[in-house]
Image (tube, rainbow, N blue to C red):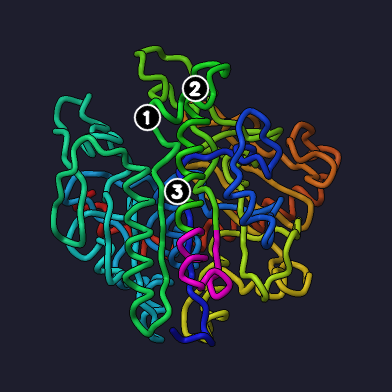
Amino acid sequence: MDKKRPNFVVFLTDDQGYGDLSCMGETDFQTPNLDAVAKDGVRFTDYYSGSPVCSPSRAALLTGRYPGNAGVRAILAGHRKATGLDAGTPTIAQALKDIGYQTAAVGKWHLGLKDGCRPNDNGFDYFYGFLAGCIDYYSHIFYWSMADGNTNPTHDLWENEHELYENGKYMTEMISEKAVETIQRMHSEDKPFFLYVAYNAPHYPMHAPKKYLDRFPNLPPDRRIMAAMLSAVDDGVGLITDELKKLGIYEDTVIYFQSDNGPSRESRNWLDGTPDPYYGGTTGSLKGHKFSLYEGGIRIPCLFSWPGHIPPEQVISEPCIAMDAFPTFLTMAGGDPSKYELDGKDISGVLKNGEKTPHEELFWEMEDQTAMRRGNYKLVINGRLCEFKTPETPVFLSDLSKDPGETVNLSEALPEMTEEMTKKALAWREGIEKTWEAKFANRYRSLT
């Protein structure tokens, strides 16, 4: 093993709310293994995903770019000809592979199924998992969208390009076990590794074995299944970190954890046919949910550790974003981020030395919503609380240092700031639209 360069293990969860970790203040259930990662390094309070929905947030994490600059702006289709990310936009896996790393992805992909868009086409030497946005946890079948009468259910479990059938096994446990096997295999080689562990929990369908449900007999049904699914994830994180310790490489490994976006309010979470919005996940006190550009849709739990290099037990409130992972990892590995077109920034100094965020401003877009953060101020244009909701107000300005729940609209009290930030946000959005039209739009017009 090359001791001069760290390994990387990236954990990603799916539709997990800002408040759904015990180290983030959750009291309904405990996540001791993820809490241990936080204790060994950093827990961020103001960390963001690149998007409030699945595919674009994953694209931002893996490419270091805003989703519109990466070629993935919306939730991608799950049929086997669905387009998405391609090798024209390098991933952090490819960048690390180019400097001698082994690379592997285990779990959910959701960045395209057609040839050229799969993990093995985008920098990963090895892939085990599924390619669509969600599957049944036991049959590993993609059912979403079949209600339209024109979309057939599709089996979706793969090892590289080989389709596997493991009916009856719980997907969360399969991801954890395969991640451990992959670490063992990669450790046997004389090369550092990058492992991307993308859990589909706690995304619907809401499935968990009885042994996890039995841990929470007194919780109401919606919270009970959420707690069980996240408890299974936390157990998996423990299996993986324990394996790193057994192999003597825990202190040589950067561990990174984030959720892809805020919790879902989609009624399909219930599994009982009711149209009621789901409220099993929590944003803490934040406003909005998945799909929303208010804080509840994009502010996410994030943990970062590297024993001996990143000081332990830190709580950092500097605003940072998922696309910062690419340049930060590459810097830690001895690579050169300047060789890539990136929107993310190296936050090594924030993690190691208590430096301020390198971002003066951060931006987001989702359909007709646009948002930006500058310092403590956050602007949201056409903000929606969740999908299918009408915009609350054309413009909402808040001071997150005093009002993290975005309860008071300061747009009338601070008209000059509102006007200036609105112009800046819309100018950024215009740039995204131009890039999209020039580089990516045609691939989606012909086939999605």
Q: Residue 252 in the image: state x and y as whole percent.
A: 55, 75
Task: Please state which amino acid type lies under the numbered disc 2.
Answer: Tyr
Toward the viewer: 338 or 428?
A: 338
Which residue appears at 38% of the width and 23% of the height?
268
Q: Of callouts 3 and 2, which one flags the residue occurring earlier in the amino acid sequence?
A: 3
Identify the mark at residue 236; answer none if there is no mark. Answer: 3
Task: Please state which amino acid type lies under the numbered disc 1.
Answer: Pro
Task: Find the distance from the CA under tag 3 to the CA under tag 2.
Answer: 26 Å
Toward the viewer: 343 or 244?
A: 244
Which residue appears at 36% of the width and 80% of the height?
97
Q: Residue 402 in the image: state x and y as whole percent.
A: 85, 42
Q: Is residue 100 left or right of residue 155?
A: right
Residue extent of the magenta highlight: 242-256
Q: Quadrant of residue 172?
A: top left
Is residue 319 in view from this perspective? yes
Q: Is residue 303 left or right of residue 419?
A: left
Which type of secondary structure does the marked residue at label 3 adopt?
A: helix
Q: Residue 310 in the image: state x and y as whole percent.
A: 68, 71
Identify the mark at residue 278; answer none if there is no mark. Answer: 2
